[in-house]
């Protein structure tokens, strides 16, 4: 198969592994920078141009769209979909997952376990917001944050109020969430492909840190997840409409709760921790499902 990998950087671990896996299974991978793609969106025969040439005869596309280029990246992916090229994850599903508010609302509607969570932009009554989500201790997050930056633990009402006030000054959307203390500074990353969790790891924050992000000094290890955690991860991915997803779960004393569903999960941590060939399994999934014109939402999303 001729497979496009939408990635801005071919030297990234995940991109390299996907290229390797495609080649190892006899396919022809091409790494394309979505921002360099240009297209005539009104043409009757949708096409994409890249460095002066028209992209032709692709069978499948693997989107690895970074958070900062979601808007343009999903537009390029949509154009591939309109050409009938099979997307590993659909543009609509990626947009759903990237919008944290929309994602949590959809997960809640399906009855998937979530930490009690509030959203706000410019609340007039901060005290009421705090009470609404069950009071301190609370985790307060900037919606645009990644790698644990902009995630703060407020242990008292006073602390929560001042953090919310400070975040409000940044004129951004704020998420106020029940603190799952019993998770002990750890979370689970479940890598879902299709209807299966193919690999899972536990990330543990460093001593005295409630955030488990590897970028914040956390460490990853292999973990056995429970059947309930497994089905929660699979249902979360399915709710987003993602074929491949990294589902982040906290172990709370009211069962597994989903924090986030990532549409371009990194492969390095999970392959190292699990020793599994996740990239190979992704390509195998495409072989099974990637028929031309098999895009479910083709042109309608
Ligand atoms: P980011 O997108 O920046 O990684 P997250 O929402 O994933 O932000 O939060 C970073 C880390 O903080 C998580 O991996 C988890 O370990 C911890 N954390 C986040 N929310 C909670 C919560 N409600 N209760 C307990 N720990 C949390
Ligand atoms: Mg995270």
Image (cartoon, rainbow, N blue to C red):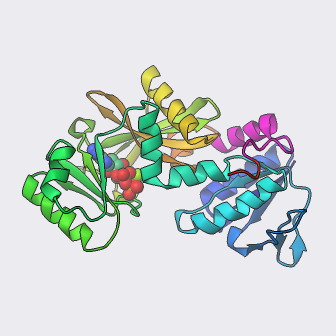
Residue 195 lies, in percent from the top left, at 62, 29
Furthest residue in direction bottom, as rendered? 52
User: As drawn, is 164 to the left or to the right of 70?
Assistant: left
For the point 23% across and 49% down, the residue is: 207
User: As drawn, is 190 to the left or to the right of 244?
Assistant: left
280 inside magenta stretch: yes
Foreground pick, 46 / 226: 46
Foreground pick, 154 / 164: 164
Task: Say if residue 265 shows up in the picture.
Answer: no
Foreground pick, 20 / 298: 298
- Which region of the structure is painted magenta? 278-297
Q: Quadrant of residue 184?
A: top left
Note whether 56 is above or below 97 in the view shown.
below
User: As drawn, is 241 to the left or to the right of 187?
Assistant: right
228 inside magenta stretch: no
User: As drawn, is 15 to the left or to the right of 138?
Assistant: right
Secondary structure predominantly adopted by residues drawn in magenta: helix
Note whether 215 is above or below 276 in the view shown.
below
Q: Quadrant of residue 116?
A: top left
For the point 34% across and 56% down, the residue is: 217
Note whether 253 is above or below 149 in the view shown.
above
Furthest residue in direction top, as rendered? 227
Residue 35 lies, in percent from the top left, at 68, 73
For the point 44% across and 52% down, the residue is: 100
How many marks overall? 0
Residue 33 lies, in percent from the top left, at 71, 69
Q: Quadrant of residue 256?
A: top left
Furthest residue in direction front, as rendered? 124
């Amino acid at each position: 198969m001729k497979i496009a990998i939408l990635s801005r950087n071919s030297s990234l671990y995940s991109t390299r592994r996907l290229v390797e896996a495609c080649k190892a299974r006899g396919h022809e991978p091409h790494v394309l920078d979505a921002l360099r793609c240009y297209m005539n969106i009104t043409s009757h025969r949708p096409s994409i141009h890249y460095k002066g040439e028209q992209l032709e005869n692709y069978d499948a596309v693997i989107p690895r769209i970074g958070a900062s280029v979601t808007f343009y990246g999903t537009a390029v992916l949509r154009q591939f979909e309109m050409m009938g090229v099979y997307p590993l994850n659909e543009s609509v599903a990626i947009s759903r997952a990237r919008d944290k508010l929309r994602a949590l609302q959809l997960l809640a509607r399906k009855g998937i376990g979530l930490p009690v969570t509030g959203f706000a932009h410019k609340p007039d009554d901060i005290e009421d917001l705090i009470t609404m989500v069950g009071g301190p201790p609370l985790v307060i997050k900037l919606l645009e944050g990644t790698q644990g930056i902009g995630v703060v633990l407020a242990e008292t009402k006073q602390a929560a109020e001042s953090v919310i006030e400070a975040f409000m000054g940044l004129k951004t959307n704020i998420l106020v969430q029940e603190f799952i203390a019993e998770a002990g500074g750890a979370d689970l990353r479940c890598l879902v492909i299709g209807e299966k969790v193919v690999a899972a790891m536990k990330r543990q924050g460093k001593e005295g840190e409630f955030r488990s992000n590897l970028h914040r000094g956390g460490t990853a290890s292999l973990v056995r997840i429970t059947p309930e955690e497994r089905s929660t991860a699979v249902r979360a991915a399915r709710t987003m409409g993602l074929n491949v997803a990294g589902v982040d779960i906290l172990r709370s004393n009211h069962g597994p709760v989903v924090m986030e569903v990532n549409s371009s999960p990194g492969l390095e941590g999970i392959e190292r921790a699990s020793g599994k060939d996740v990239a190979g399994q992704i390509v195998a999934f495409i072989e099974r499902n990637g028929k031309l014109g098999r895009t479910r939402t083709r042109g309608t999303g």
